Image (cartoon, grey):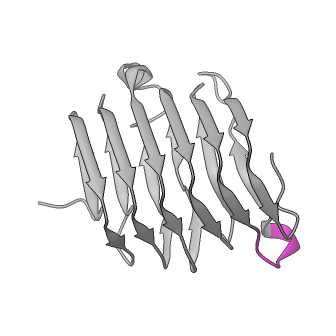
Amino acid sequence: MSDGDGISIYSSRNIWIDHCALSHCTDGLIDAIMGSTAITISNSYFTHHDKVMLLGHDDRYVPDVGMQVTIAFNHFGVGLVQRMPRCRRGYIHVVNNDFTEWQMYAIGGSANPTINSQGNRYTAPVDANAKEVTKRVETDEGGVEWVELENRWRRNGKWG
């Protein structure tokens, strides 16, 4: 039974998602929750969807602090709105991805994740109200630790 996600990772480890093309799901394209870790999402193509990728169950779910995810060599294409990814807790390495014209924000975080963004290319949308590359959500569980290395910006994307 599906909860509407394209791919659901639930309390799992040592997962590799590679060379997928995902769009138009009922809920998220990829969700990794409930203490999942050692996940790589690579060489995939995402388009036409609102909530692309959720990493972490909710802000109060402490076991997700051990989550480790690498998101590498993906293309986040046209028609995407947010959560490329949305991170709660854990360590997330976002490396060598191409982000094209999101409608709200590209990468979001809350509950004190560490997000290492390295070597990505961000092409911001023309809409001046949608240029936010990162969204930091302050919660009772803490903010976000951002590490930015060697990213390339086009059309004046805004690092939040």
The percent coordinates of residue 55 (x first, y second) are 43, 42
19 or 78: nearer the viewer: 19
Give the number of callouts.
0
Magenta segment: 124-129
Q: Is residue 153 left or right of residue 36?
A: right
| Quarter of the rendering containing residue 140 | top right
Which residue is situated farthest in the left direction here?
1
| Quarter of the rendering containing residue 127 | bottom right
Query: Is residue 90 shown above or below 149?
Result: above
Residue located at (88% from left, 72% from top): 128
125 or 88: nearer the viewer: 125
Q: Is residue 154 left or right of residue 75?
A: right
Query: Is residue 109 shown above or below 53?
Result: above
113 or 45: nearer the viewer: 45
Q: Is residue 160 magenta?
A: no
Dividing the image into 4 quarters, which one contains the C terminus? top right
Magenta stretch: helix, strand or loop mostly: loop
The percent coordinates of residue 112 (x first, y second) are 60, 25
Residue located at (47% from left, 50% from top): 72
Residue located at (36% from left, 72% from top): 22
The percent coordinates of residue 50 (x first, y second) are 51, 69
Query: Is residue 34 shown above or below 42?
Result: above
Residue located at (77% from left, 69% from top): 124
32 or 68: nearer the viewer: 68
Dividing the image into 4 quarters, which one contains the N terminus? bottom left
